Amino acid sequence: MPLDLSRVLPEARIPELPNPYFGKVRDCYDISGGRRILISSDRISAFDRILTSIPWKGQVLTQMARWWFEQTADIAPNHVLEYPDANVVIGKLVTILPVEIVVRGYLAGTTGTSVLTLYKQGVRQMYGHVLPDGLRDNQALPQPIITPTSKAFDGGHDEPLDEATIVAQGLLTQEQWNTVSKMALALFARGQEIAAQRGLILVDTKYEFGVDENGTILLADEIHTPDSSRYWHAASYVQAFEDGTRPASFDKDVIRSWVAARCDPYADEIPEIPAEMIAATAAAYVEAYETITGEPFLPDMNGATPLDRVRTNLTPYFEA
């Protein structure tokens, strides 16, 4: 059944809910009991900006992250408490650590902080690692590496970091760094293993960790979704690498590349994304969900609009 592309959740501003925080993709509300409501909108962001909205993206991300949280609970405890709606997570309220943990297995990327961008600029020492000369676009790195960045709030730009700087600046303690880096590499290894079973390559991904009131480090936000990760179809990789082209993917890199080819995405006005690209991207998100989880995507058609449905399902929390 074709997707109804008219059902879009560009934002979830619900005045009956207290303590709002609106991020690039999620609209959040802090409620009693040390809980946070996280509503995944259909906004798509890159280059520290909102590019457009993709129908069904929020539901896909929420449900895929749910699947991955369940597959990795033995590696890292996470913030999830319950799922009252297809686009919503009720999570434990955590203080997000001010370092975004990015794990990369390949020399790839289009953003200013990606290892490929830096490598093409002649940089060989980055994020506390030294990369060898002679690597080609999209080549596998000798081993997966962590490339941490500062966690930019309120629309700021992420900046590259390394372990020594993180600890010296007090962003994380040495013990916290040891914990999150060990978890991140183990999560990435699990992700690559499962992806390979599905005919996919998990190229790189980002993780966000937070601490609860007891100081326990929890995996938060999302995990191994097309928004937080880059996936390639394994069958396309060898030929694309030989040809020097980008392997077939179903992450937001398609839109990132389209925008980057037409403007300076960090400075210029973003051109309007064509309707056919939005439709293709929506289909790619659904394909990603079904390929990775092995389950059919079941769009939640309840409510006159997605926002009406979300509001209805969150009514019990209005007084919370």
Image (cartoon, rainbow, N blue to C red):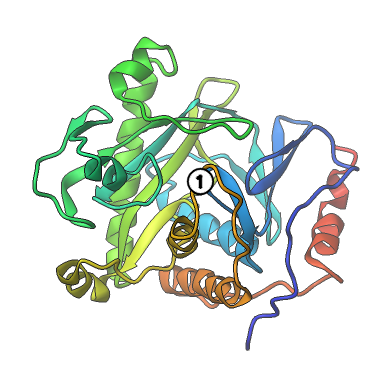
Percent x, y of residue 98: 50, 25
Q: Is residue 55 left or right of residue 247?
A: right
Percent x, y of residue 282: 57, 72
Q: Amino acid at mark 1?
A: Phe
Quarter of the figure with residue 283: bottom right
Percent x, y of residue 166: 37, 19
Depth check, front residue: 220 or 123: 123
Using a 10 Å C-alpha cutoff, classify the residue at mark 1 as few (fewer than 14 neighbours), some (14 to 19) or many (20 or more).
Answer: some
Tell me the residue at 58%/78% (across/down): 276
Q: Is residue 68 left or right of residue 186?
A: right
Q: Is residue 300 left or right of residue 274?
A: right
Q: If the image is split into quadrants, where does the C terminus sit?
A: top right
Tell me the residue at 35%/11% (across/down): 168
Quarter of the figure with residue 177: top left
Q: Judge whether 306 appears above or below 16 on screen.
A: below
Q: Judge whether 175 appears above or below 108 on screen.
A: above
Q: If the image is split into quadrants, where does the N terminus sit?
A: bottom right
Q: Residue under label 1, please give it.
A: 47
Q: Is residue 268 left or right of residue 224?
A: right
Q: Judge whether 91 appears above or below 129 on screen.
A: below
Secondary structure under tag 1 reads loop
Percent x, y of residue 278: 59, 71
Tell me the residue at 20%/66% (across/down): 244
